[in-house]
Image: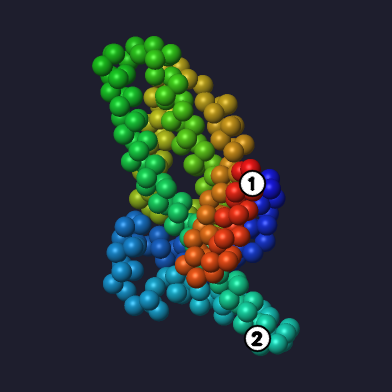
């Protein structure tokens, strides 16, 4: 199944309303993913931002369907919508976790490339550092374009990076682009390639989040179906 088709199917069930935006604001108030996770370990589950998200989504689904079907059908629809909200929340948490991992991994490589340039007196031949640096910038661009794609498609362009991740990400991206400029690398084609791959990256990320959500909810059959679909897409 093509990435655009998979993403359209995923988009059909994902909520993008005020409940998700409110949850993002609550999580962002912690400042970092580590602070959020630490707070959830000691908090009452019914008072957590994730619980509040589920409650808002279910209440909204019941209100919007009141009088349109039998109570059991309305409750089932509310549960389905809450599950999709959890999927989107998992996607957002995964984006932030991947951002933190990328900042560490690519930050170390960027520092090593910068040291090589410094030792050479800023006269590092383009062919020497160019391929490694271009690949690094390409990975940063792909991660960013994938995130922007998800934000545009599911979150009305609302940023889902937590405050510290957003600041550190922009700082590293600026540093990588400045280093590329110093060795004479042109980046427009690298950015264009990242944009072209954003839809596939977003589909893979959201599908992985959906699989994790179904496993969390003990819907193992649903998780197995996603795994099978991903294998068929690869084959």
- Label 1 belongs to which residue? 233
Q: Left or right: 123 with respect to 79?
A: left
| Residue 82 occupies quadrant | bottom right
Q: Is residue 7 above or below residue 234?
A: below
Mark 1 and mark 2 in contact (Cβ < 8 Å)? no
- Label 2 belongs to which residue? 72
Give the colour scheme shown.
Answer: rainbow
Query: Regarding mark 1 in the picture, which secondary structure is present there?
Result: helix
Q: Is residue 195 above or below residue 39?
A: above
Q: Left or right: 13 with respect to 214?
A: right
| Residue 14 occupies quadrant | bottom right
Asked if residue 22 can be seen in this view, the reply is no
Query: Regarding mark 2 in the picture, which secondary structure is present there?
Result: helix
* Image x and y of residue 83, in percent: 55, 69
> Which one is in front, 169 or 78?
78
* Image x and y of residue 58, in percent: 56, 77
> Which one is in front, 103 or 6?
6
Q: Identify the residue shown where x is 34% and y is 62%.
A: 36
Q: Left or right: 68 with respect to 197?
A: right
> Which one is in front, 48 or 167?
48
> Which one is in front, 43 or 163?
43
Neighbor class of circle 1 (other Cα within 10 Å; few <14, some 14-19, many 20+) is few
Q: Identify the residue shown where x is 64% and y is 76%.
A: 77
């Amino acid at each position: 199944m093509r990435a655009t088709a998979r993403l359209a199917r995923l988009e059909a069930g994902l909520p993008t309303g005020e409940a998700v935006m409110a949850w993002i604001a609550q999580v962002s108030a912690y400042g970092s993913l580590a602070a959020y996770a630490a707070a959830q370990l000691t908090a009452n589950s019914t008072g957590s931002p994730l619980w509040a998200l589920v409650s808002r989504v279910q209440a909204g689904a019941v209100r919007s369907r009141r009088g349109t079907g039998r109570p059991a059908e309305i409750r089932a629809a509310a549960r389905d919508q809450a599950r999709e909200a959890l999927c989107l929340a998992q996607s957002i948490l995964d984006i932030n976790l991947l951002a933190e991992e990328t900042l560490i991994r690519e930050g170390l490589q960027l520092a090593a490339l910068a040291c090589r340039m410094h030792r050479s007196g800023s006269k590092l031949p383009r062919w020497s550092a160019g391929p490694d640096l271009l690949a690094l910038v390409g990975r940063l661009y792909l991660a960013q374009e994938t995130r922007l794609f998800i934000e545009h498609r599911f979150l009305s362009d609302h940023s889902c990076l937590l405050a510290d991740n957003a600041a550190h990400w922009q700082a590293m991206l600026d540093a990588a682009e400045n280093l590329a400029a110093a060795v004479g690398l042109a980046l427009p084609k690298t950015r264009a390639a990242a944009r072209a791959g954003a839809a596939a990256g977003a589909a893979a990320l959201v599908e992985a989040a959906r699989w994790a959500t179904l496993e969390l909810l003990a819907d193992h059959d649903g998780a197995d179906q996603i795994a099978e679909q991903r294998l068929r897409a690869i084959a």
